[in-house]
Image (spheres, rainbow, N blue to C red):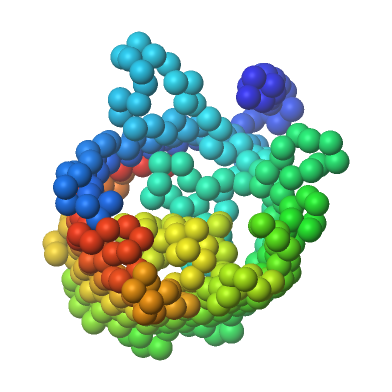
Amino acid sequence: MRYFTLLLVAFLFFAPLSFGQLTVKFNGELRTRLEVDELDFNANTGFHHYINNRARLGTVISNNDDLEFVFRIIDARVFGQETSVQSNSANLDLNEGYLKIKKGNWEFLLGRQEARYNNARMIGQSDWGNTPITFDGATVRYAGKGYQISAFAFRVADKQLVGDSLDQNLFGVFSEFRLADNLKLNPFVMFDRRVPVENLARLTLGVNLTGSFGPLSHDIDFAYQTGNIKTNKEMDISAFLAAINLEFSFQVQSKAALGAGFAYYSGDKDAADNKYEVFDNSYATKHAYLGDMDYFKVVPASTYNLGITDIYGYYKMALAEWLAGKLSGHLFGSAQPYKLSTGTESNAFGTEIDLAFMAKYNEYLNFNFGAATFLPGDIFKEKKGQDTAFWFYAGFHLNLK
């Protein structure tokens, strides 16, 4: 970090000499959110109160032509996390820091950057959490008439060991083809590789289809994963994801809309064989999918390798010019059955109900508040607890772009 800071100071000092006339734009963000939860399915433990806080400050330095330097620092913390009121947790980190070069239809990004493709079900910032997902590497984009192609190479982990042992890289190509004014086809491919390659070589092939027909819009995903992975033994990967979201807009002033969808993340049928069949969504945006309470973030770990199905519906509308609300319901099940201690099998994770509101103060400041509850099914009752779980939140988001 010290080395990077020296480079940054040198860049800022010599930039005017290199580019001549520069444009400098600043941006900032402050997000503070109180959360009150009882997520352990045990009513006897009581509620847990905490305040998440995130502050970001950034700048974009441009020569008004083909070069941009994007730099943003972040401080993410829970209020009171230091050992005393005079402690310094040295929590400041680099959120983004990259060079962007534009040449005609081409665009190049080099450095630490956020990445989001399609609906972020495969790759996204996961912005609800205090620390968003960022990647170190390079991205190349080309925009043609009616299509766009992006390719990236990211270093996900670097252990600084001899022979790059345990290092991990992520490569991908995402494309977007506009088939009609209201229809887009977005095929993609990703390759996740760890050193040595016997530890992980996962190829993901997929497609996203979005569009609308009058008041009805759709968002469809399908992806298949193949390759090899080593946990306690070497296994062949064979997993898939299928999801569809349909939304009907009533086309009224309140922007009311009714939506429903289904998502299936495959799970492992037999832990004793040499097949790894649970779909991995490590780089996806969390919270936007699989419920607001975030019980199912990374699918393999949070579903006990069973995979997950999500049948859901929602209704959203503007209650006033400055206030929007959304009510959602999820029925979660495992993709593969779980054998209970009674000897019977079950696929029931549980049912979640989410209620969220956003109040707009002005173009920079929003207030957010909501509540959710989770009624455990057979699997969660055995693995987590018998009681209903609750979660409440209230906060504000200041975004100075």
The answer to whether residue 363 is above or below residue 171 is above
* Count of marks, rendered view: 0
Q: Residue at x 30, y 25 (%)?
A: 80
- Name the spot of residue 281 as percent of width and height, x first: 54, 62
Would residue 164 be visible to someone looking at this image? yes
Residue 71, x across and y down, in percent = 57, 34
Q: Is residue 346 left or right of residue 39?
A: right
Of 308 and 41, nearer the camera is: 41
Looking at the picture, does residue 195 appear above or below residue 278? above
User: Which residue is outermost to the top?
Assistant: 86
Lateral position of residue 328 relative to residue 219, left or right: left
Q: Please name whichever residue, 344 or 283, is drawn nearer the observer in this view of the structure.
A: 344
Rendering coords of residue 226 (x, y %): 70, 72
Can residue 357 be seen in the rendering of this structure?
no
Residue under the image location 53 percent in, 30 percent down: 93
Q: Nearer the viewer, residue 95 or 378?
A: 378
The image quarter in which residue 205 lies? bottom right
Q: Nearer the viewer, residue 299 or 69?
A: 299
Q: Position of residue 348 (x, y in %)?
A: 34, 75
Q: Residue at x 38, y 36 (%)?
A: 54
Q: Quadrant of residue 309?
A: bottom left
The quadrant in which the C terminus is found is top left
Residue lying at the far front of the rendered structure: 342
272 lies left or right of 90? right
Q: Relative to 386, is 185 above or below?
A: below
Quadrant for the N terminus in the image: top right
* Residue at the image position 23 percent from the left and 82 percent from the top: 250
